[in-house]
Structures are given as C-alpha cells and as structure tokens.
Image (tube, rainbow, N blue to C red):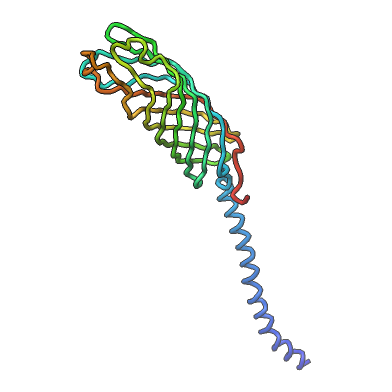
C-alpha cells in the first residue's frame, strides 16, 4: 500500500503537466474556430466583387444644348430630347475603384436661335468617355458608383451650319469632361445619370459677317438618364 501511495505521489506532477500542456492547445483551437467564425461574419458582405473585367449595355435619353459665350445676347440655345445607345467595359482595380470605358452612339437635337430666326439643329455621332469610378456597397445591397473623366465626341452627320450658314458654321467634333452617378442592383441592372460638357469651342464664323465678333465660343453640353446592364456580375475573392 505504501508503494501505491508513493507511485501516485510521483504521477501527480506528471498528470498536472499533461493538463497544462493540453489545455492551451484546446483553448487555442477553440479560439481559432471563434476567430474564423468572426472573420466570416465580418466579410460575408464584402467578399463578392465584380469580375476584374466586365461589360454591358447602356441606353439613355438625353437633353442637350449649347453654352454660348457672347458679348451681347444675340444667340440662344434651347434644350431638346435625344437618345444614346452603346456599351461599356469595366476594369476593377480595387474593391472601391474601377476604370470604365464606353462607346456610345448619340443623337442630339436643340433649337438654336439666331436673332429672330430659330433653327432646329440635330447631330449624330459617337462618344468615347473614360470614367474613373469610386464604388461603394456589396452584393447583397447593390453598388453605388460615382466618378468622372474625359470624353471625346466625333460627329458624323448633322445639319449644324447649313441653316443660317451665312452667319455661322459649327463643327460638332469636340472634347471635354463628364460626370456619372450609377446605382447597380444585385442582378446587374443599373440606373445611370450622366453629364457631359465640352471644353473645346465648336464655332467658326464667316469672315465677312459683322456679327462674328459677338460670340466668343460655343460649347455643347448634354444631360443623360437611363439604364444599363452588366454581364458576368460577380465572383468571390476566394476564386
């Protein structure tokens, strides 16, 4: 019996050491599991982003006119309704930043008043905007994108300069800056609002016209509102 108590006395410290060695491992495993659960809960709304490169279609209605810099109010421009149709390509740089390029066919019209005469002007062309976008949101709630950038407009058909050509002529090719605000729903449908204004003057007066000195510059501007759709919406970061 004495030997049994002696053996137990010797084993007690070893059992204590075993408990000390096992307990931290068990606690560590439980803590890692808890952290893993916590991380999953924290990132569940952020782990899904647009693909690195995506694309889609845009269709908008527009209203457009000219900003006229002049010494006297001899000329005026009134907004009329037009339309735009095209596509976009998105390059996702980070979770909150993307670069978007567009190619848009445009149809614009406005009423240009030259003293007492009013001419309905129309123009067809295409725009190439490049937008730098800040993006906020997630897959479950949708994405809000806001940004802007440069654009170039190429005109291929119009009656600008034909009516009243003895007074002025206009070349509707121009470049400027644009701004965009987009809300994208989880299914890929977007509501889009855009504004574009030219920074280059499009007017060229006839040298013999006495009124030529009145106007210092004509700059097209356009407001758009429409919808878009993105293909191949989202993927997970894990992929």
The image quarter containing residue 229 is top right
Q: Nearer the viewer, residue 119 or 83?
A: 119
Residue name at image x 61 percent, y 55 percent:
37
Across and down, in percent, residue 222 comes to: 40, 23
Residue name at image x 21 percent, y 18 percent:
213
Across and down, in percent, residue 46 comes to: 55, 46
Q: Residue furthest bottom?
A: 2
Residue 39 falls left or right of residue 81: right
Q: Nearer the viewer, residue 80 or 134?
A: 80
* Quadrant showing the N terminus: bottom right
User: Does residue 62 sit above or below 19 in this rendering?
Assistant: above
The image quarter containing residue 203 is top left
Q: Residue furthest front?
A: 208
Residue 22 falls left or right of residue 221: right
User: Does residue 53 sit above or below 175 in this rendering?
Assistant: below
Residue name at image x 56 percent, y 29 percent:
57
Q: Nearer the viewer, residue 220 or 44?
A: 220
User: Does residue 139 sit above or below 191 in this rendering?
Assistant: below
Across and down, in percent, residue 147 comes to: 42, 37
Q: Nearer the viewer, residue 19 or 217?
A: 217
The image quarter containing residue 171 is top left
């Amino acid at each position: 019996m004495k030997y049994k108590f002696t053996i137990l006395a010797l084993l007690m410290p070893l059992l204590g050491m075993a408990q000390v060695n096992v307990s931290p491992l068990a606690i560590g495993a439980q803590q890692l599991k808890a952290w893993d659960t916590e991380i999953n809960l924290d990132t569940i709304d952020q782990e899904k982003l647009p693909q690195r490169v995506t694309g889609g279609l845009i269709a908008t209605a527009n209203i457009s006119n000219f900003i006229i810099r002049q010494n006297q109010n001899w000329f005026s421009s009134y907004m009329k309704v037009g339309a735009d149709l095209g596509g976009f390509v998105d390059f996702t740089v980070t979770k909150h930043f993307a670069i978007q390029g567009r190619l848009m066919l445009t149809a614009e019209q406005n009423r240009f008043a030259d003293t007492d005469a009013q001419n309905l002007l129309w123009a067809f062309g295409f725009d190439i905007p490049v937008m730098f976008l800040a993006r906020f949101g997630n897959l479950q709630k949708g994405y809000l994108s806001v940004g802007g950038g440069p654009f170039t407009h190429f005109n291929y058909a119009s009656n600008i300069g034909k009516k009243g050509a003895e007074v002025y002529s206009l070349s509707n090719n121009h470049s400027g800056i644009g701004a965009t605000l987009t809300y994208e729903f989880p299914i890929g449908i977007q509501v889009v609002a855009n504004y574009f204004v030219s920074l280059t003057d499009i007017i060229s007066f006839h040298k013999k016209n006495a009124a030529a000195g009145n106007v210092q510059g004509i700059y097209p501007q356009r407001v758009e509102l429409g919808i878009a759709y993105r293909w191949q919406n989202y993927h997970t970061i894990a992929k």
